[in-house]
Image: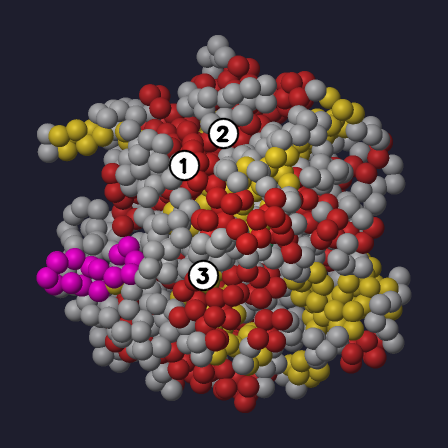
Amino acid sequence: MEFTRRDFLKTTGATTAVLAAGLGFDLKPVQAYAQSLRIKEAKVFPGVCPYCAVGCAQLIYVKDNRIIDIEGDPNTPHTEGALCPKGSSTYQVSINERRVTKGLYRAPGSDRWEEKPLAWMMEQVAQRVKKTRDATFVETEKGITVNRTDGLAWMGSSVLDNEENYLIAKLARSLGIVYLENSARVCHSATVPALGVTYGRGAMTTNLIDAMHSDVIMPTSNWAECHPVSYKWVMKAKERGAKIIHVDPRFTRTSATADIWAPIRSGTNTAFFGGLINYAIQKKKYHHDYVVLHTNAAFLLDPEFKNATELNGLFTGYDAATRKYDPKTWRYQLDENGNPKKDTTLQHPQTVFQHLRRHYSRYTPEMVEKVCGLPKAKFLEVAELFCSTGAPDKAGAIGYALQLNQSTNGVQQIRSLTILQLLLGNVGIKGGGVFALRGHSNVQGATDMGTLYHMLPGYPPMPLRDPHPTYKDFAEKVYPRTGYFSNMGKFMVSQLKAWYGDAATKENDFAYDYLPKRASADDYSHQHMLVEMVKGKVKGFIVMGQNPAVDSPNAKLARDGLRNLDWMVVVDLFETDTAAVWKAPEVTDPKAVKVEVFFLPAAPAAEKDGSLTNTMRLLQWHVKAVEPPGEARSDAAFIVDLGLRMKQLYAGSKAKKDRPILDLVWDYKPQGPKVEPNMELVLKEINGYATQDILKDGQVLYKKGQPIKGFGDCRDDGSTACGNWIYSGVYPEEGKNLALRREKSAPGDYLAHNWGFVWPANRRILYNRASADAQGRPWSEKTKVIWWDAAQKKWVGIDVPDFKADLPPDAPKFAEGPFKGLSGQDAFIMRADGKGALFGPLADGPFPEHYEPYEAPIKNLLSRVDKNPVAKVWDIGERNRLGKPEEFPIVLTTYRLTEHHAAGMSRHVPWLSELFFGHFIEMSPELAAERGIQSGEMVTIVSARGKIQARALVTERFRPFIINGKKVHHVGIPWHWGYQGAVPSAKGEITNDLVASLGDPTTFIQESKALLCDVRKGEV
Ligand code: SF4
């Protein structure tokens, strides 16, 4: 059954009794009581929790255009109606006296806000955007059209809807903006290349519900508290006999559920997983047949290539002068047909497998103990248990979040566990996989929609000036020759058609030149943007639903950057720390602060239409239940309104640089005084439609304007428009919005294919071809997902095949077509070679190698190379001073809490913020005794960048580590606090002030999980 908004309201919009009937129970016995229920005669609307990426579906009860209650939707397959404290308090996100309901203006040098009408605000904002754009626009560089402005920056948002992020990407790029980011950069950006390089797609491989089928689950984050509702599936697995191993420096509620708690020092995950890889190989625990069939283990590498055991911490090609690798030897040996040479015995010394074995031969249990601080006996217990899942009838799953991401080795820390999962044959099978536990409600969707500086919606890269001056160069250098990504040209052309319509023609390479071109590959990330604000290069900034004053590393530097802007537009529900940066506690005289601030009030999910993509790639649509108060309106209304005003301001311009705005397809039927656009029109554009009648075999396949059924129908001749190919299929017919579909699971369909829509193509378990052997037979009854049915001549099973559905297992490679280069044996179809990558080149090497964090208590014991040799270190003098262990002997990690969320929406919600007495630091009794600190007293935490105060929480949840024979203390600080909040306990000093400006070399995510500090008694 397909679902429209009207269908939903018809079935759920009547009364409590109707709803109760739908739930399968009868309210008659309590009818008298029911008459008094608060929700009696309320209308009910589908909602989605706006906090985290578990994406708990909600029911919003409304009377007289007022929300009266918000509850979990009991039909939701992945949550079964549960909500955690944050979700349970969603009511107070809408009904909250702290909501800003009028436009607020802060003039440069003023010490107060002034209320201003919406129309005035928008007029001023549009003029500021135009003025800054015109003053800073660069049309050509080195003779190449670059159409770029470095003077404007936009922070889109991992809490905005997919449609809103898509609109931001479309408008910002058309304005020439290259500084475009969302908070994924500072939370989960390392995930995308780590999973992408190994498996082909940078997203969670499986489905939360499927965790219940695991035999061993290894969370490396505080899953139970940070993604609480989803943890029920881990507990369900435990009830079914699964074992849980929790890897975390701190004992948490996740540890309390575990069979083994394995504390390791923050920042040493590659050493830990490297130890498990070594153990699996040495003890022959790997799934041999899976490894040979489904990974690149058997491929021979270039004879010149050397791994980091052979080169003492480096790989071939390192240039110390540029601090970069030349990866020319990081490649396969090819035969006369251009295919990788193979040794399926895995014995040839140049096989990927033998390099992997030699590379990790240093990662012994003894070394793990010395580096990570995990006793050898405990490590061996973990290794024996987790590597037991290398058997064909066993499934192991690994969960992770920010502990692995936020590091100068972030990408490789994650990649190390993806390699382990390939070795054990745990990817693509029932109960196996990698649970990439995303943070914000739509951090997955915001990433998919390309509000990140380096990419476009659906993951094509943002063009670079030098390698991609023309579309021909872009196509030649970016599009793979084989694998399903070889279709990228169809997706790219369709996206350009969606953006520029009739102005995108074959003759002008579909308006490729309209896109801005980056001057370099590494200069526009979140941290770089803030540094350039401090320097005065970035002058105007739009920030929506994000709070960089608190969530940025080296946050004091970030706040200085914000104050140094000419102007800033904040679109949010509450007066955030970012909006109030001109009167932050460190500002002695607000009148001396120059930034001009426009605050535009926004609407939360309950007050607008749109979709959110949760951590398992599930799109769920929420319906506007009430009108936003006052002049508040959806973020989409702001974006569409701004786009319309830019078109008006540039109307009549003959300048080439203004064509991307004038030609922008921007008709979303805005309605009413608040200019609310029709979000299903945006969804339809994202899904894709025919731009002309399309014929197939003489028959009309699509009429002009008709939605396409999936990305397989995207074309590169301009006959299709598609905003984001990976979402194609979500809106397959006019009026049919599959993100709004809310059907309980059919019997046997535990993956709940009729609830929402999962990209790509509603597949719930990615790479599921890998659950079968070379003949298409399941590795085991227990772990099977799809298998080849010879009678039906197709792949069948419990999920949509992540494979060509009718391709026999013995089919040879396709020479042409959409599956070019892939055969019936290739489960990882997005990779050019079709195989899971044990060997996968990244900026810092093709195998993950342990390097110490930039601030660490010891030197690297695994090689002579101490730190990641290609990591980014911002050269900003004393403000980025790095601490030495002699001065800062304590390892500090940051984390978050169940009742708060990220940089602060929860601080404006009294029901949540009253639950804490204030900001705190957790430390062990041993450390407290050494420093004479009592639990509850105020202490000062000092790093080389700054100091903050918080109350001591002395607890055995932290214990000192023995690192290379030396006692090392470890502390932890949650990072939610800031200077804005509903109650005094919501306010506190900013943990990120302690963090340095450092970046992983692939994504430039910061190192905020492992730094050095000192803890001093009292306020010093
Ligand atoms: S915060 Fe996350 S786990 Fe809690 S109710 Fe919301 S979506 Fe669910």
Q: Which residue is mark 2?
A: 171
> The N terminus is located in which quarter?
top left
Location of residue 213 in the rendering, given as x and y in whole percent from the top left corner = 40, 70
Amino acid tagged 1:
Asp
**Residue at 29%, 65% in the rendered image:** 785
Disc 1 crowd, CA 10 A, few/some/many (<14, 14-19, 20+): few
In the rendered image, residue 796 lying in the magenta stretch gets the answer: yes
User: Does 259 sit left or right of 888 as displayed?
Assistant: left
**As drawn, 392 above or below 666:** below
Q: Which mark is residue 7?
A: 1
Q: Secondary structure at mark 1?
A: helix
Cα separation between marks 3 and 2: 34 Å
Disc 2 crowd, CA 10 A, few/some/many (<14, 14-19, 20+): many
Q: Nearer the viewer, residue 239 or 517?
A: 239
Q: Nearer the viewer, residue 995 or 400?
A: 400
- Residue 594 in sight: yes
Q: Secondary structure at mark 2?
A: helix
Disc 3 crowd, CA 10 A, few/some/many (<14, 14-19, 20+): many
Q: Which residue is mark 3?
A: 208
**Residue at 83%, 79% in the rendered image:** 930
Q: Which residues are the magenta region?
A: 787-801
**As drawn, 966 above or below 102:** below
Amino acid tagged 2:
Leu
Cα separation between marks 1 and 2: 33 Å
